Amino acid sequence: MEITKEQLIFSRGEGGNLIPQEVKLENIDGDFTVKLVPLTRGKLQEIHQMATSTDSQERLNADTVIMQSGLVSPKLTDEELADMKPQLAVAINQAILAISLGLTQKEVGDKTDEVLQNQELMLKKK
C-alpha cells in the first residue's frame, strides 16, 4: 500500500496549528493528563542540535524548548517551567517526545536512561 501525504504529516487545525492531544503521563505515579502537540521534524532537529551542543547552557535549554513547544495545557510561563518538579518535567518531556516519534513513553524513558548512562561513562573516562 502506498503511503499518503496525510500519513506523513501531523494534522493541523485552525490557523495551521498542530492539533493538541490529551495524553496520560505513564512514567509517574498518579493519574495525570496533559494536552500536548507533537514536535515537527524541524523542531526535533533544532532541539537535537541544542542537546548536543558544546555549550552547557544550550544543552540545559533543550529540555525547556521541548516543554515550551509541546505543552499546550496547562500552559506555563518560562518562570513556571523553571520551577517545575523534576519528575513531572521529565514525564511531560518524555510524553512529548513519544507522540512526536511514534514511540511509547516507556521506550522514550528507556532511551533517555541509556543516553544518560553513556554520558556518565564518557565523563568518567575524562
Image (tube, grey):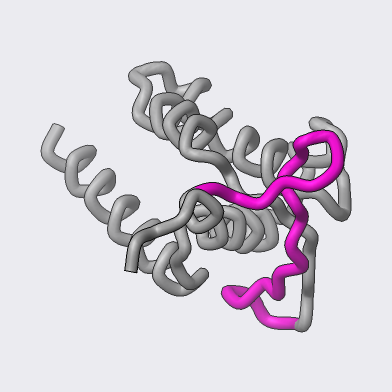
**Which of the 4 quarters of the picture holds residue 21?**
bottom right
- Give left or right: position of 99 versus 37: left
**In percent of the image, x 39 and y 59: which residue is there?**
3
Q: Nearer the viewer, residue 63 or 15?
A: 15
Q: What is the x, y in percent for residue 117?
A: 27, 55
- What residue is shown at x 39% (from left), y 57% (from top)? 112
Query: Does 75 sit above or below residue 20?
Result: above
User: Image quarter for residue 2?
Assistant: bottom left
Query: In terms of depth relative to the viewer, which is nearer, 75 or 89?
Result: 75
x%, y% of residue 94? 55, 59
Residue 108 position within the rendered picture, expressed as x and y whole percent measured from the top left: 43, 63
Look at the image and tell me in which quarter the C terminus lies.
Answer: top left
* Horizontal and vertical percent position of residue 97: 52, 54
The verdict on residue 20 being magenta is yes
**Residue range of the region highlighted in magenta in the rendering:** 9-30
Residue 105 magenta-highlighted: no
Is 73 on the left-hand or right-hand side of 58? right
